């Protein structure tokens, strides 16, 4: 896929992004246009979402053969299913006849039947029936199938890639995987279905808030968050080729949890070390997955942009194996979710107003506190991809112009 250079994006703009990659004491925030401009969003879809690994859900959403769920990212309707060979498959939900979606929601099925004209596709996306097509010239049913995507499973999370030539994800997540290994996420118990929300702000506003420790004792000041003080944050350096980055935040006591007792009320993940239990861990695999990890719960956030200033997010919960069988589990979970809900409401209000501010003529490229090291890590993931895509786009435009010149 390719795009033509937009008139409001130029070399100076992309060169200037390098200022967001400096050390945290010298770095600047990204330009406001990166969060508001429609042309930049179109560019970003090609620079990031067409080629990076995108989290779409969890393996336990498709436990049995025929289980499926649907989702949408950057406007592409997607089906994820488990086929009869126990493989997880991901494919377009767009019927190859008249573009009707062949599936909605989630469920279990033997195949996908387009409700419009009853074309039938297998769990692998192959067309197996097309009624009344016998008179169509040169119509070969075997040549028709739903477009399929690369799939990779990492710690129980399902990732897809629109780019058939994309390198594997897991080898570039070794540092993140080692840091969260004791949570044994692949075997954690998921509470499904996830909660899905629609939001009026850019996906990066949400992603940055998810990994920002600077605001913890400011915005969330009070008994529901003071046990994770901002001054105890730290940011392991991510390598240039890493596909994710981390933030650790020390806690005032072991086994903190977002509830009025400030202590874990659900079973602690059994393999956690003393070090794990004395901090909160935040793992980020951009552009779509953020993890918030405490001793008794992991909150995962799957971000799905829908436009330059809009997005959807799937929010799910993971607990230790067997936690749901503990006496009073529902009541204990309610304790956590009531407290977490108050914190999330504060974050959502801020995200909404940040987006308003980013549209202002007075929005500037600000400076960072040392407690915002994760934001620089994010910038260092984003900026090289933006700059590489811009260079490639310019090359394509130049080649096209040269070809037109020769033809003339």
Image (cartoon, rainbow, N blue to C red):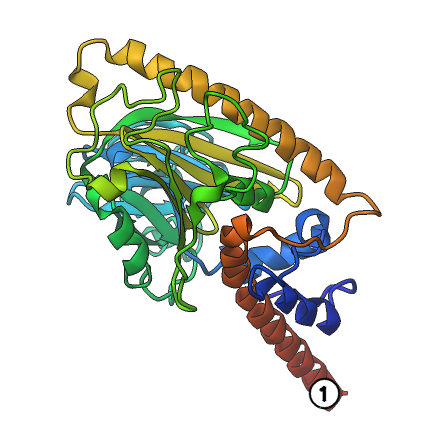
| Image height of 268 relative to 326, above or below | below
Residue at left 41%, top 61%?
237
Judge whether residue 82 can be spotted in this image: no
Q: Camera-side residue: 257 or 45?
A: 257
| Image coords of residue 366 (percent x, y) | 70, 53
Query: How many labels were placed on the picture?
Result: 1
Report the residue that reaches farthest toward the right: 361
Q: Camera-side residue: 70 or 154?
A: 154
Judge whether residue 23 can be spotted in this image: yes
The answer to which quarter of the image holds residue 164 is bottom left
- Which residue is denoted by mark 1 in the rendering? 407
| Image coords of residue 390 (percent x, y) | 62, 70
Q: Camera-side residue: 31 or 64?
A: 31
User: Which of the image's four quarters has the C terminus?
Assistant: bottom right
Report the residue that reaches farthest toward the bottom: 406
Side of 322 relative to 41 (left or right): left
| Image height of 29 relative to 55, above or below | below
Side of 187 relative to 72 (left or right): left
| Image coords of residue 169 (percent x, y) | 33, 59
Side of 198 relative to 283 (left or right): right
Residue at left 63%, top 27%?
349
| Image coords of residue 8 (percent x, y) | 78, 62
Residue at left 67%, top 72%?
15
User: Which of the image's four quarters has the N terminus?
Assistant: bottom right
Q: Secondary structure at mark 1?
A: helix
Q: Residues within 10 Å of mark 1 (few under 14, many from 20)?
A: few
Q: Camera-side residue: 107 or 237?
A: 237
Side of 118 relative to 347 (left or right): left
């Amino acid at each position: 896929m390719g795009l033509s250079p937009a008139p409001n994006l130029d070399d100076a703009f992309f060169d200037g992004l390098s200022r967001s990659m400096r050390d945290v004491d010298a770095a600047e925030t990204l330009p406001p246009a990166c969060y508001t401009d429609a042309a930049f969003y179109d560019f970003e879809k090609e620079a990031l979402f067409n080629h990076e690994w995108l989290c779409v859900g969890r393996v336990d959403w498709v436990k049995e053969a025929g289980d499926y769920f649907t989702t949408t990212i950057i406007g592409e309707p997607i089906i994820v299913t488990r086929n009869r060979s126990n493989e997880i498959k991901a494919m377009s939900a767009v019927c190859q006849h008249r573009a009707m979606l062949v599936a909605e929601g989630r469920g279990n099925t033997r195949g996908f039947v387009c409700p419009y004209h009853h074309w039938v596709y297998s769990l692998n996306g192959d067309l197996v029936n097309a009624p009344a097509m016998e008179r169509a010239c040169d119509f070969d049913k075997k040549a028709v199938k739903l477009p399929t995507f690369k799939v990779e499973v990492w710690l129980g999370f399902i990732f897809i890639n629109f780019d058939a030539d994309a390198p594997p994800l897991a080898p570039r997540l070794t540092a993140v995987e080692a840091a969260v290994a004791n949570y044994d996420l692949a075997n954690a118990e998921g509470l499904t279905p996830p909660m899905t929300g629609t939001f009026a702000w850019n996906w990066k506003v949400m992603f940055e808030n998810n990994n920002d420790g600077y605001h913890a004792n400011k915005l969330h000041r009070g008994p529901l968050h003071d046990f994770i003080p901002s001054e105890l944050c730290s940011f392991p350096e991510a390598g240039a080729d890493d596909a994710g980055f981390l933030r650790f935040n020390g806690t005032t006591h072991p086994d903190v949890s977002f509830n009025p007792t400030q202590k874990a009320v659900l079973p602690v993940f059994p393999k956690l070390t003393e070090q794990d239990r004395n901090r909160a861990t935040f793992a980020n695999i951009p552009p779509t997955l953020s993890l918030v990890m405490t001793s008794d719960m992991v909150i995962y956030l799957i971000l799905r942009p829908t436009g330059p200033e809009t997005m959807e997010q799937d929010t799910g919960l993971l607990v230790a194996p067997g936690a749901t069988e503990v006496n009073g589990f529902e009541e204990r979970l309610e304790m956590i979710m009531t407290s977490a809900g108050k914190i999330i409401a504060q974050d959502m209000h801020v995200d909404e107003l940040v987006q308003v501010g980013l549209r202002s003529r007075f929005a500037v490229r600000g400076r960072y506190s040392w407690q915002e090291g994760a934001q620089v890590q994010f910038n260092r993931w984003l900026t090289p991809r933006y700059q590489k895509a811009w260079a490639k786009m310019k090359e394509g435009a130049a080649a096209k112009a040269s070809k037109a010149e020769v033809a003339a």
